[in-house]
Structure formats: C-alpha cells, structure tokens
Image: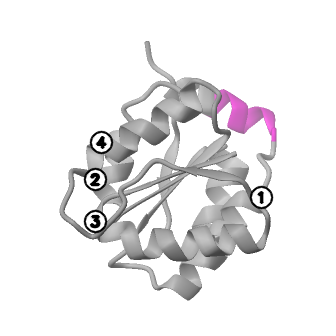
Amino acid sequence: MIALGCDHGGFELKQEIKKHLDQQNIEYIDYGCDSQEAVDYPVYAKKVARAIQNGECEKGILICGTGIGISITANKFKGIRAALCTDCFSAEATRLHNDANVLAMGGRVVGAGLALKIVDTFLNTPFSNDERHIRRISQIETD
C-alpha cells in the first residue's frame, strides 16, 4: 500500500500520480490535500509518515511545490527515509542504497511525464540489501 500526500503546490501532480497508480492496479491511500486551496505541507507529511510508521502503508509519495519542505518534515519521523528526487537515477539510487521509503517531488519542479517515470523507478527498484548499505542506514537512525 502506498501513502500519498501533498499540499496545494503538489495537488495537480498527485492527481496524475493517482491515475497512473490506478492504471497499474497499485493500491494507495490518499491522505490529502483535496484541492488547490492553500494548506500547510507539514500536516500531510506527518499523515504519510505516521501511516508508514504504523504499518498501514509500506511506502509513501509526498509532493509540495518544491518537494523540499515536505521531505524535511517527513524525515523528522523515526524510520522514515524520504528522498527528494527530480530524476530516475536518483530514485533508483535511493532505493538501492538508502532503502528510501518515501519519494518526495516538487509539483512546480518536475513535469507529470517525468514524475510518473520517477514514481515507477522508485516503486519498482528493490533495496540492494548490501551489508555496507544496511550499516549506513543503521547509522542514520537516531534515538
């Protein structure tokens, strides 16, 4: 299950991603927002992060205007590794090396066509399970 969240700056792109996931029969929960009316991105980052923490969802996709604020917020949560990606190489590398569980994008930065490719790359790339990456991830986690 994929957790989706956005603010007003990411609403349009989230709608495109939902259509794309529907076409692929990938299940998701949309935690909002539900329009282009101005909202605060931390509210939605927190909902997605908590859904992953409590096991309701395996991965998340967060979108705000730049992807920066929403990823910073998500990364405050223990066990969340949110990666801001603007290209497929970064999406692949963060899954392989960091076992990132949240993809963050900027709705005002990445166009829909590229964003859907980034989503596919992120969702379809497994973690490498290499010992060096496991060791490094364990060093990220703090008390």
Q: Earlier in the sequence, mark 3 or mark 1?
A: 3
Against 57, is 112 above or below? below
Q: Is the C terminus in the top left, top right, bottom left or bottom right quadrant? A: top left
| Helix, strand or loop at mark 3 | helix
Q: Nearer the viewer, mark 3 or mark 1?
A: 3
Mark 2: secondary structure: helix
Would residue 23 be visible to someone looking at this image?
Answer: yes
Q: Which residues are magenta?
A: 129-136
Query: Which residue occupies the extreme top position in the image?
Result: 143
Report x, y in % for residue 86.
48, 73
Ranked by sequence position, the earlier of labels 2 and 3 is 3
Dominant secondary structure of the residues highlighted in magenta in the image: helix
Q: Which mark is residue 69?
A: 2
Q: Position of residue 60 (x, y in %)?
A: 56, 48
Cα–Cα gap, marks 3 and 4: 12 Å
Figure quadrant of residue 45: top left
Question: Residues under labels 2 and 3: Cα distance?
Answer: 13 Å
Q: Nearer the viewer, residue 98 or 43?
A: 43
Image mark for residue 43: 4
* Numbered label attached to residue 54: none
Q: Which residue is mark 1?
A: 125
The amino acid type found where label 2 is placed reads Gly
Would you say residue 79 sits in the magenta stretch? no
Amino acid carrying label 3: it is His
Which residue position is annotated with label 3? 8
Q: Is residue 115 left or right of residue 89?
A: left
- In-image side of 131 versus 63 (left or right): right
**Quadrant position of the N terminus in the picture:** top right
